[in-house]
Image (cartoon, rainbow, N blue to C red):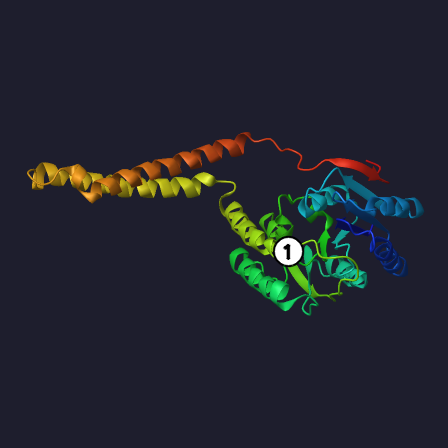
Amino acid sequence: MDISVVIPLLNEQESLTELHDWIAKVMQSNHFSYEIIFIDDGSTDDSWQIISKLSSENKHVKGIRFFKNFGKSQALHAGFEKAEGQVIITMDADLQDNPDEIPELYRMITSEGFDLVSGWKKKRYDSVITKNLPSKLFNWAARKTSGVKLNDFNCGLKAYRNDVVKNIDVNGEMHRYIPVLAKNAGFANISEKIVQHQARKYGETKFGMERFINGFLDLITIWFLSRFGKRPMHLFGALGVIMFIIGFGFALYLGIDKIFINPTGRLITQRPQFYIALATMIIGTQFFVAGFLGEIILRTKEDKKRYAIKEALNFNN
């Protein structure tokens, strides 16, 4: 199979038929073998009924339905697990991503050898204050922190080689950082393509300003996990040892001063250095124990499912 199109969605009943027809037209005109995987992330409208209808009319349409809203990352993870195409294309269901971009994205993966190609909506039709400016700040911070030189991390339109999506774990709200996850997994041949941004045609955006706050928090998380996720003792143990040495140094100084230099001076407990020594040794010990426990948890954890599928359509496995 040439292409799998993975589309997570939440309450997008108005746009699904139009999006399906547009994608099918592109696939047929380019003679691609394909599948379209819709992941219904707990919609409360008629989205699943429309997906079921499309699936009955087009054998290339497949559907996954969650019991409730588990989040976009979990929806993408479910779609990636089922995708069979040589190239996986992700896009949003709100018609703001243009399916006409698919052939060029496919060519960049298959002919130019990229592991991942991310869309860049250079010209946007969103609000400048509430979306464009925060998005620019968010992307700048992501570039500086991750070392991945992309202009638009959060663009839903991306293309991947199959083995990329099979070897990354998209969880929590990490869908914004799939290029970073791919780089950390060893897929460093990442590029971007300027894509057309369509103005929203139906409904309202499902994301507010809080997504940027959550995005920055997730950025800190992924930075930490990429640096120390496999070896927490390297961070917490090092901090603990440094702080304990500082505290022990103060305590040693106070002891030598009291015994040999100024035995008739103030009591040790009346000197501020005593409390600095005590606090830093305690904190240092806690850091060290945190690193040790992190190592134990890392080695004994079991993977747990992060979502529950209610129905699936047209899958053989």
Residue 81: x, y in percent? 73, 41
Q: Decide: is 178 above or below 244.
A: below
Residue at image coords 88%, 57%: 21
Question: Residue 145 or 163: which is nearer the viewer?
Answer: 145
Residue 314: x, y in percent? 86, 40
Quarter assignment of residue 311:
top right
Quarter assignment of residue 237:
top left
Residue at disc 1, secondary structure: loop
- Residue at mark 1: 208
Residue 275: x, y in percent? 24, 40
**Label 1 Cα crowd, 10 Å radius (few <14 / some 14-19 / many 20+):** few
**Residue 277 is at least partly visible in this image:** yes
Residue most extreme to the left: 264
Residue 178: x, y in percent? 64, 51
In the rendered structure, which amino acid carries the disc numbered 1?
Gly
Question: Residue 67 or 249: which is nearer the viewer?
Answer: 67
Position of the C terminus, as image quadrant, is top right
Q: Decide: is 179 above or below 132.
A: above
Residue at image coords 21%, 40%: 274
